[in-house]
Amino acid sequence: MTYLVTGGSGFIGSHLIEKLLRNGHSVINVDNFDDFYNYQIKIKNTLESIDKNSDFEFSDKETDIRRLTDISQSDTYHLYYQDIRDKEGLEHIFKDHRIDLVIHLAALAGVRPSIERPLEYEEVNVRGTMNLWELCKEFNIKKFVCASSSSVYGNNEKVPFAETDNVDNPISPYAATKKSGEIIGHVYHNLYHIDMIHLRFFTVYGPRQRPDLAIHKFTKLISEGQEIPFYGDGNTARDYTYIDDIIDGITKSILYLETHSGVYEIINLGESEVVTLSEMLATIENTLKISATRKILPMQPGDVQKTNADITKAKTLIGYKPDTDFQNGIKKFVEWFLRK
């Protein structure tokens, strides 16, 4: 099978591509190496995902990405430095390859930045996604997996969060764009019979996690003896999901789409295990064997109080079975962090 993966040089995407290649598939990676965080991290992710030597000498962004593109090409792997907002550029990729299924992970991420740059989030997360659906329609590609987010639930008072819950009250532009993707996706499913699954990811962590996210940021600051920004009273809680379990959920969703027709589904992928901010910090401190210095700050606009996934549907429909508890997941992450 040939899969097109958008955002394939990011945290989740690079792990997914690594798994797909190991399973004998061909992969087309479409990534714009956005400056949301250092492009060099994405180059390292890419090299790891295709099992290439990561001893890469950096110079400037454009030169480095050209070199990466040259050294990474193979019969089963193609890398394209491409923005999903550019439909014409995407079209060339669709013309050059016979694509069996699209896994759309690319997005402008982050709740807080979306409040500052809402129009850019709409351009990437809504218009960019629609570009892909338009091309799927044009090139008769009928299978599509799309990354959504637990942020669509907002401050839902009912826990755990189920796919049937009302999600009409997002509290950030980022969450609103993800909800929009689910709604517009249904239009393309209904009109053009594109089978699709929208996966609501719940706070993914593990090796290669973005450095701006809390677990990575806390680990780095604590290990360097710096104070950490600690928002609120520590009682906010998240359903942290280890990367291997997320990849398992994505690959099982792919299999479900390949073996079923007439599919439009929204599925939670979480651990169904809620961990407070204070508990998360304590786990990192215990694993590093270093105590943190906290800088207490007020809650930030757009942050939700709690996420908690009901994963009954994922277990029943696709056979999802997360098996990495938080303590062990943090241990694996810290081991990766200390040797990278």
Image (spheres, rainbow, N blue to C red):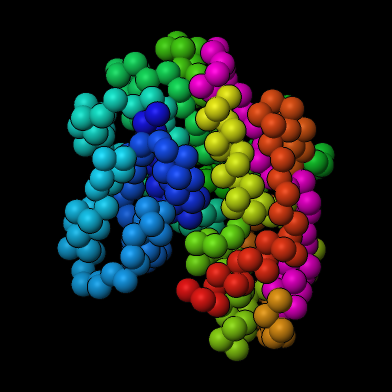
Q: Tell me, yes or no, whether the highlighted magenta stretch contains residue 61.
A: no
Q: Is residue 331 left or right of residue 106?
A: right
Residue 298 placed where, x, y %?
68, 69
Residue 188 placed where, x, y %?
45, 18
Residue at point 56%, 16% (across, down)? 260
Image height of 156 relative to 205, above or below: above
Q: Is residue 272 left or right of residue 294?
A: right
Q: Is residue 278 visible?
A: yes
Image height of 83 relative to 340, above or below: above
Residue 41 placed where, x, y %?
39, 65
Question: Dividing the picture into quarters, in which one does residue 213 lie?
Answer: bottom right
Residue 6 placed where, x, y %?
39, 41
Q: Is residue 117 left or right of residue 295?
A: left
Which of the image's four quarters has the N terminus?
top left
Residue at point 78%, 62% (across, down)? 276
Depth check: give the residue in front, 304 or 193.
193
Q: Which residues are magenta?
A: 257-286
Q: Is residue 88 visible?
A: no
Image height of 269 relative to 303, above or below: above
Q: Tell me, yes or no, whether the highlighted magenta stretch contains residue 263.
A: yes
Residue at point 69%, 85% (across, down)? 290
Question: Dividing the picture into quarters, in which one does residue 46 lie?
Answer: bottom left
